[in-house]
Image: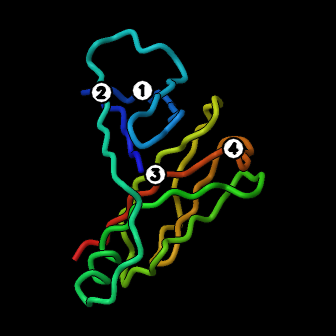
């Protein structure tokens, strides 16, 4: 699971990007426009997907506090609902990155609740898109 954020000090400019060719050892990133300045930083987190918790109480609790997973979209649509593998007891924070074959489409997250969140795209996307999600419930 890859989450990435492009950061630039004192700038409100947004440069859309997508992830490409994610595998266990590497990934590529494609920006919508050339980055010509050297004051950008790319903040990246890389994790293995969450696994089903074992039967111990603490493992179940930990698995539900932080969840890491990817979702292959199954339909063509502007809006997709992403369900958490396990329901949270309260609304979590959500970080999502989009992996696609080559097409950058702007997106936004909304309607976060304890069971799911919504990701809305600027134009329709299909089963060639994978959503990488890192979610965490605050205690």
Q: Are marks 2 and 3 in contact (CB under 8 Å)?
A: no
Secondary structure type for disc 1 = loop
Residue displayed at 39% across by 65% down: 50
| Residue 56 in the image: above or below residue 36 | below
Q: Earlier in the sequence, mark 4 or mark 1?
A: 1
Q: How far apart are the two marked residues, 2 and 1, measured between alpha carbons? A: 8 Å
| Residue 56 in the image: above or below residue 45 | below
Secondary structure type for disc 4 = loop
Q: Which mark is residue 96?
A: 3
Q: Looking at the picture, how far across and down is residue 98, in whole percent?
A: 53, 44
Residue displayed at 51% across by 25% down: 30
Where does label 2 land, which residue? 8
Could you say which quadrant of the image residue 5 lies in?
top left
Q: Which mark is residue 13?
A: 1
Could you say which quadrant of the image residue 14 lies in?
top left
Circle count: 4
Q: Looking at the picture, how far across and down is residue 60, in whole percent?
A: 32, 83
Secondary structure type for disc 3 = strand
Secondary structure type for disc 2 = strand
Q: How far apart are the two marked residues, 2 and 3, measured between alpha carbons? A: 19 Å
Instruction: State left or right for residue 18 relative to residue 38.
Output: right
Instruction: State left or right for residue 46 relative to residue 15.
Output: left
Q: How far apart are the two marked residues, 4 and 3, measured between alpha carbons? A: 16 Å
Which one is in front, 45 or 54?
54
């Amino acid at each position: 699971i890859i989450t990435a954020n492009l950061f630039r000090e004192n700038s409100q400019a947004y440069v859309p990007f997508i992830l490409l060719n994610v595998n266990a050892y590497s990934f590529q990133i494609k920006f919508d426009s050339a980055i010509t300045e050297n004051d950008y930083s790319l903040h990246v987190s890389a994790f293995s997907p969450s696994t089903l918790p074992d039967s111990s109480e603490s493992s179940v609790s930990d698995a539900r506090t932080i969840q890491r997973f990817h979702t292959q979209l199954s339909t063509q649509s502007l809006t997709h609902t992403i369900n958490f593998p396990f329901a949270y007891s309260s609304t979590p924070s959500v970080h999502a990155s989009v992996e696609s074959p080559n097409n950058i489409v702007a997106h936004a997250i909304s309607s976060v609740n304890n069971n799911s969140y919504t990701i809305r795209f600027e134009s329709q996307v299909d089963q060639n898109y994978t959503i990488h999600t890192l979610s965490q419930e605050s205690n």
